[in-house]
Image (spheres, rainbow, N blue to C red):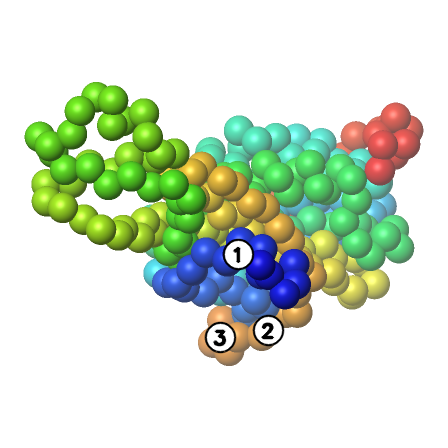
Amino acid sequence: MRFKSLTGLKRREPREIMLAALPEDIAITRFALDKAFKINELVRKSFKDSFEWYGFTLAARDRPETIIDIGLPVNEENILEYASLVPEKIAAFQEELPPDLVINGWIHSHGSMDLRKFSAVDEANQRTVLDYVTTKLRQPVAKREIVIDDLVCLVEGRYQETDLAKGSVSLITDRPVQEAVLLETIIGGFCYAIVVGDGGWHHQEIHYKKRSILSGHAAIRSRAAELRYVESERRLSEDDVRLLRAEVLEKIRPVPYKPDVIERM
């Protein structure tokens, strides 16, 4: 067989059927974002300097794509340019939440720094959060065809052991089959990442993780995303601020400057 061009030799793309869409922007209530910046303010006022801190973005379990609150765990250590996130603390914090709330990402501060993006240290923290969140929020997102170049269809009770040596994959059925299409489920999940600064700026990304059930192929990607504000009746009240101030004093733990950490950023 002759081909007029090399395009005739291209392997066809496997069929993929979408089952569910993962978010492309970050839905957040004004209450949640106001709370994040209020934590920044309280950290500065409480400790007389702009220390970094981290927290978790929270969502209703039945609407995991929308951030409705910010959870502040005990920070292991906070310095001027770095906030440490310990993996074991994520599961512990989730266990303390009401059953109807779930962690869907994380948020942290760069304080007074003008680094309006994620650092290398942030990326390491992000991988930890992504692994945890996607195990809780994963769902079937697609069916993808497994292309088999040399499929051999056999019938139960009608083949010899030598027949199993043929082809790259053997499909044994209870009746004769001339052709078969295999579709594997792709499980996917997402995780939000937001960084804020004292000047009122914010930067955010969505991280995705997908895994094919049969082939085991895994893919991780991320993209910058816009914040989309969602209407909510809840507003940051004086009582909220008073409770938040107590949380900051209890959970933020400033430590001395660490030059070795800064060099890794």
State which quadrant residue 94 falls in.
top left
Along the viewing direction, whichever of 240 and 131 lies nearer the viewer: 131
Camera-near label (1 vs 2) is 1
User: In terms of secondary structure, where does tag 2 sit?
Assistant: strand
| Residue 141 seen from this side | no
Q: Nearer the viewer, mark 3 or mark 1?
A: 1
Q: Secondary structure at mark 1?
A: loop
- What mark, if any, has residue 228 been given in the picture? 2
**Residue shown at 10%/41% (left/top)?**
174
Looking at marks 3 and 1 on the same chain, the residue that comes earlier in the sequence is marked by 1
Q: In the drawing, what numbered circle is on residue 54? A: none
Which x, y percent locates residue 23?
Answer: 52, 64
Q: CA distance from mark 3 to mark 1?
A: 65 Å
Along the viewing direction, whichever of 83 and 213 lies nearer the viewer = 213
Q: Secondary structure at mark 3?
A: loop
Label 1, on which residue?
1
Q: Position of residue 177 (x, y in %)?
A: 18, 49
Circles 3 and 2 in contact, beta carbons < 8 Å: no
User: Given the image, on which type of amino acid does mark 2 rest?
Assistant: Arg
| Amino acid at dot 3 | Ser
Q: Is residue 225 above or below residue 56?
A: below
**Would you name the residue on which mark 3 appears?**
232
Residue 211 visible in image? yes
Q: In whole angstroms, how far apart are the C-alphas of marks 3 and 2?
A: 13 Å
